[in-house]
């Protein structure tokens, strides 16, 4: 089940939330209820996937408990390594074995299609728990139900944000519902729907229409369509996740913070998929020594983290190249580029970042390296078969409004516009706002009904 | 579109959305399931197959999702709303249909070159052996004939070369060129605005071309076109959810049209090729020769002495009405539904003429004509 | 106390691990037969017990009337069915190189079963019942679709033929 399924919107969510809100919220059964609802949500995609989720949850919960009760340091470390090794084995089995060794047999090549939805996300949440408990045994999860809610709450089990155990665990014990949280939750959920259904799904149509186009305008539109589509798809879904969390009293931290307003690649990664970059920083980069090592070792640490980040996103070469590219850009900035950038006006730095990530995402979405290079070349006119053709012009004229909205939203201008509208509406602000959101929701449902909605891009991870 | 809340937050939002979500759920449960969507012209899922196997793989849940989605209250309203919003935002193409100047035009299909070659070969082999005069007419798509109706810069699939390849003269088959005739009348109402078929007028021009190739004199003005529906919304409307576009369906009758009777595929006989009951359904085009008829035979009181064997797709349905005065019998075979041996048709009567009347889209992508002809061709070799 | 609970936890962890490995093995190992037998041999073994009047061979150019398959996409394909519309009996054997073809065959056969079943449901209950017991067996490089008596016998016969038995 995904958040844009009509079954979720008009059956699962109203029933589960309204019952929780009016009958369950203040009782001791709250977490058990949420856990069972989450298992139903996840099991909707297939009992096979649910079985794997439960086994992974059980494995990590037991590992955390075992580590917490072990006083002997070397043995604690051994249990940690065994726990993480099994987790990584599960990840390897479904995400990499079939892609790297699929040539050996039909059964192996079919494995990636059997991967449970959200495996990379919930596995990383589980590993966060195990590692945090290793570092401080006092914070082991209280019960399997609590742990299950933490790692597999239906709001974030499919597509994150990845849970940082030590920071989130207090909320598991106490997550009271307040009017502020529910209002905020509903707003976030609707904002997310707008981004996903109205922006991302329509950008996907633009992206698909221009695949294979070889003109300059066509390629540029193609690149920017993906540029915005990935952002609004993922940030939209994250927003919906945070919204649903808030509806149940959880405060899930931001996963995106206006990343396209960043002025450097390093800054960009403090604003994009924050939960993943935090995870790699806390559990890979810092244990490797971070920047408190020799210069060469530090550079290797950075590249190692980014290689793994690329690998997390995909098993094929373009993803690895993409990851190393991000790492290389950060190293370049830290070495000498920052000094140059600081002297440039903001506008130019902004263009630098947009170009850098446009190129990066082109590798990310290409099936192979050669076509990625070809597309990037055409952004600069190299190898383009002309400035534009009828297809490029046709798609451009049809998507102008869409692109303008994307730019306004991704630049943060929308917040200012929102405040302006609020001031102008005066006392009627709340009523007008509600009507606005309901209409927007109706438009989303209309689009969902008329098309098989694009499934969330990160669902492959 | 972020609207800032006041300090206490918007007190109306949560109650309003809760009411909306719960209300839709209650409506979905209470309202009876619909079996067919008039707007989309397709059957709707009425139930889901729940089995252990299905639940393990997630297929049962998928079916339940489809069922729920198909039965959502207000589905048609949402479908039309989507069309209007897209149109308002400047979108000029939905699901490969161009939203043109007061018309919807389908993007022509990508041709299957090998299939076209094989079909032409099958037609040639069949024609060499059947002892009749053979004619091939492939109708060009509306997007090719009426480009002035397309939105500006519309990226129409270029099928000119594929279309011209079909028109190459085969030794035993006379190719009937209809593209130019239609082109001369491109500003007339020759294709429906909401459907991929040609109108009765367009079919008339095609019939004239075909009869001219057969050395039969036909004056199109002899046929009076009488409207039978003003509210036809065709396949393209069903695909896009369009609103405000409606078509008129005419039937063409001439004083020279003889009396005739029709023997349908199930053996029943009627005195008219028109199926009036179709006018009360969604797909009003089926008024012409009904639908899914594998074989139809029309016997007329015409004294022409010529009998026609016609292989066709649905485009020919509205052409047949023009052919009635000129043949004493017309046997119509639709290879998509015809599963029997062609020998049953060929062996049961003597035909003077054989025509293949297809639209480009079907001819370039569907293999049923080739399969039916080759089955007969191979038996002749044995 | 602590030692015993750690023993319990260790045991449960081991059990969980075994379950996970069990799932992996099941999913990673092929459980379809890859046959080295030539097509003619398999065909002959499968059809030898069938009445040729009920299952005459049908030319592949007519295959599309029955099954939504492109005969040229398969290394070898044979279809058997008599022309009587009231007879549900039919048989199709295919040989192929890649898993997608096998999947396409399975989908086409299942579609055929469903539509034939619906057609017969109204007026021919015996034929309809025959469709309910129809057999679709997709192995690694061979597949079979069979409607007729003793489908389970046919399944055994097919698998034996693939393994090279008698």
Image (spheres, coloured by chain):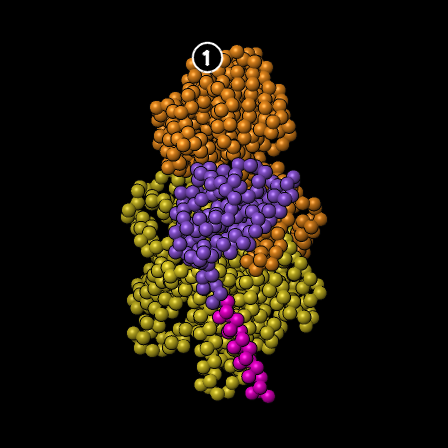
Chain colours: A yellow, B orange, C purple
- Packing grade of label 1 (10 A; few <14, some 14-19, many >=20) is few
Depicted A21 relative to depicted C101: above or below: below
Residue designated by label 1: B217
What percent of the width, then of the height, locates residue B281? 63, 32
Instruction: Return the residue found at the far left.
Output: A382
Depicted A17 relative to depicted A206: above or below: below
What percent of the width, then of the height, locates residue B375? 44, 33
Depicted B16 relative to depicted B339: above or below: below
Question: Foreground residue, B251 or A442?
Answer: B251
What percent of the width, then of the height, locates residue B149? 46, 29
Main SS, magenta residues:
helix
Asked if one can make out residue A160 in the rendered structure from this viewpoint, the answer is yes
Q: Mark 1 — on which chain does it sit?
A: B
Q: Residue at x 54, y 20 (%)?
A: B321
Q: Classify the position of the N terminus of chain A by image quarter.
A: bottom right
Question: Foreground residue, C7 or B28?
Answer: C7
Q: Residue at x 67, y 67 (%)?
A: A25
Q: Residue at x 60, y 19 (%)?
A: B261
Which span of residues is magenta-colored? C1-23
Q: Residue at x 51, y 56 (%)?
A: C156
């Amino acid at each position: 089940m995904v958040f844009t399924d009509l079954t979720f919107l008009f059956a699962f969510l109203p029933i589960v939330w309204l019952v929780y809100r009016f009958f369950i919220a203040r009782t001791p059964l709250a977490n058990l209820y949420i856990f069972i609802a989450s298992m139903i949500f996840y099991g909707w995609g297939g009992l096979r996937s649910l079985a794997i989720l439960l086994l992974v949850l059980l494995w990590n919960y037991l590992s955390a408990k075992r580590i917490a009760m072990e006083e002997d340091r070397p043995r604690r470390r051994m249990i940690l390594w065994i726990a993480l090794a099994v987790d990584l084995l599960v990840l390897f089995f479904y995400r990499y074995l079939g892609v790297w060794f699929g040539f050996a047999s039909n059964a192996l090549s079919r494995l990636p299609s059997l991967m449970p939805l959200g495996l990379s996300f919930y596995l990383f949440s589980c590993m966060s728990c195990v590692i945090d408990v290793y570092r401080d045994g006092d914070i082991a999860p209280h019960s399997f139900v609590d742990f299950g809610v933490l790692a597999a709450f239906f709001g974030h089990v499919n597509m994150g944000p990845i849970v940082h155990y030590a920071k989130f665990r207090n909320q598991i014990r106490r997550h009271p519902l307040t009017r502020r949280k529910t209002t905020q939750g509903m707003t976030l959920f609707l904002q997310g729907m707008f981004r996903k259904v109205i922006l991302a799904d329509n950008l996907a149509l633009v992206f698909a229409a221009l695949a294979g186009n070889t003109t300059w305008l066509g390629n540029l539109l193609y690149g920017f369509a993906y540029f915005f589509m990935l952002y609004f798809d993922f940030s939209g879904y994250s927003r919906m996740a945070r919204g649903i969390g808030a509806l149940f009293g959880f405060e899930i931290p931001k996963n995106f913070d206006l990343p396209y307003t960043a002025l450097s690649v390093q800054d960009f990664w403090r604003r994009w998929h924050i939960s993943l970059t935090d995870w790699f920083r806390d559990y890979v980069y810092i244990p490797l020594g971070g920047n408190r090592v020799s210069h060469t070792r530090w550079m290797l640490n950075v590249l190692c983290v980014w290689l793994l980040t690329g690998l997390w996103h995909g098993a094929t070469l373009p993803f690895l190249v993409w990851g190393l590219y991000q790492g290389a850009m950060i190293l370049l900035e830290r070495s000498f580029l920052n000094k140059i950038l600081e002297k440039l006006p903001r506008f130019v730095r902004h263009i630098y970042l947009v170009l850098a990530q446009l190129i990066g995402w082109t590798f990310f979405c290409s099936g192979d390296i050669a076509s990625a290079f070809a597309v990037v070349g055409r952004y600069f006119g190299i190898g383009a078969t002309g400035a534009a053709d009828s297809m490029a012009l046709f798609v451009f004229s049809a998507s102008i409004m869409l692109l303008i909205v994307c730019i306004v939203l991704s630049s943060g201008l929308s917040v200012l516009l929102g405040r302006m509208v609020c001031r102008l509406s005066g006392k009627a602000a709340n009523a007008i706002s509600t009507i606005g959101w309901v209409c927007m929701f109706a438009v989303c449902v209309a689009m969902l009904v008329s098309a098989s909605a694009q499934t969330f891009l990160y669902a492959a991870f | 579109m972020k609207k800032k809340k006041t300090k206490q937050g918007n007190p109306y939002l949560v109650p309003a959305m809760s009411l909306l979500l719960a209300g839709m759920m209650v409506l979905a449960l209470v309202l009876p399931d619909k079996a067919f969507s008039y707007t989309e012209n397709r059957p709707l899922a009425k139930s889901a197959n729940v089995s252990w196997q299905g639940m393990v793989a997630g297929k049962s849940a998928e079916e339940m999702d489809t069922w729920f989605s198909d039965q959502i209250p207000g589905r048609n309203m949402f479908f039309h709303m989507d069309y209007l919003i897209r149109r308002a935002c400047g979108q000029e193409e939905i699901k490969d249909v161009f939203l043109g100047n007061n018309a919807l035009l389908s993007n022509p299909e990508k041709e299957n070159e090998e299939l076209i070659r094989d079909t032409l070969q099958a037609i040639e082999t069949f024609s060499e052996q059947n002892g009749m005069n053979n004619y091939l007419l492939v109708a060009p798509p509306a997007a090719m004939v009426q480009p002035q109706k397309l939105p500006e810069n519309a990226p129409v699939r270029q099928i000119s070369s594929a279309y011209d390849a079909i028109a190459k003269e085969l030794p035993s088959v006379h190719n009937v060129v209809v593209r130019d005739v239609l082109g001369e009348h491109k500003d007339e109402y020759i294709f429906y605005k909401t459907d991929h078929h040609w109108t009765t007028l367009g079919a008339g021009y095609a019939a004239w071309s075909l009869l001219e190739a057969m050395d039969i004199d036909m004056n199109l003005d002899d046929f009076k076109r009488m409207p039978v529906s003003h509210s036809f919304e065709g396949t393209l409307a069903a695909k896009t959810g369009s609103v405000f576009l409606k078509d008129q369906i005419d039937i063409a009758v001439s004083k020279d049209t003889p009396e005739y009777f029709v023997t349908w595929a199930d053996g029943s006989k009627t005195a008219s090729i028109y199926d009036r009951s179709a006018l009360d359904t969604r797909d009003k085009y089926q008024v012409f020769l009904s639908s899914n008829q594998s074989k139809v035979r029309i016997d007329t009181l015409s004294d022409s002495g010529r009998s026609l064997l016609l292989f066709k797709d649905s485009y020919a349905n509205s052409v047949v009405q023009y052919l009635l005065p000129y043949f004493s019998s017309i046997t119509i075979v639709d290879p998509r539904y015809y599963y029997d041996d062609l020998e049953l048709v060929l062996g049961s009567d003597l035909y003077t003429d054989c025509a293949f009347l297809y639209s480009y889209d079907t001819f370039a992508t569907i293999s049923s004509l080739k399969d039916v002809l080759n089955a007969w061709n191979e038996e002749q070799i044995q | 106390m602590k030692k015993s609970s750690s023993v319990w936890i260790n045991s449960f962890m081991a059990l969980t691990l075994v379950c996970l490995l069990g799932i992996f093995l099941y999913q990673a190992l092929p459980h379809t037969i890859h046959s080295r037998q030539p097509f003619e041999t398999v065909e002959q073994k499968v059809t030898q017990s069938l009445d040729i009047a009920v299952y005459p061979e049908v030319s592949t150019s007519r295959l599309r009337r029955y099954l939504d398959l492109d005969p040229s996409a398969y290394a070898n394909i044979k279809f058997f069915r008599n022309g009587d519309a009231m007879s549900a009996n039919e048989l199709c054997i295919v040989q192929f190189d890649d898993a997608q073809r096998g999947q396409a065959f399975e989908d086409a056969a299942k579609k055929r079963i469903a539509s034939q079943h619906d057609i017969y449901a109204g007026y021919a209950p015996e034929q309809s019942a025959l469709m309910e017991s129809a057999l679709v067996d997709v192995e690694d490089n061979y597949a079979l679709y069979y409607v007729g008596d003793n489908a389970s016998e046919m399944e055994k016969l097919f698998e034996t033929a693939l393994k090279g038995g008698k």
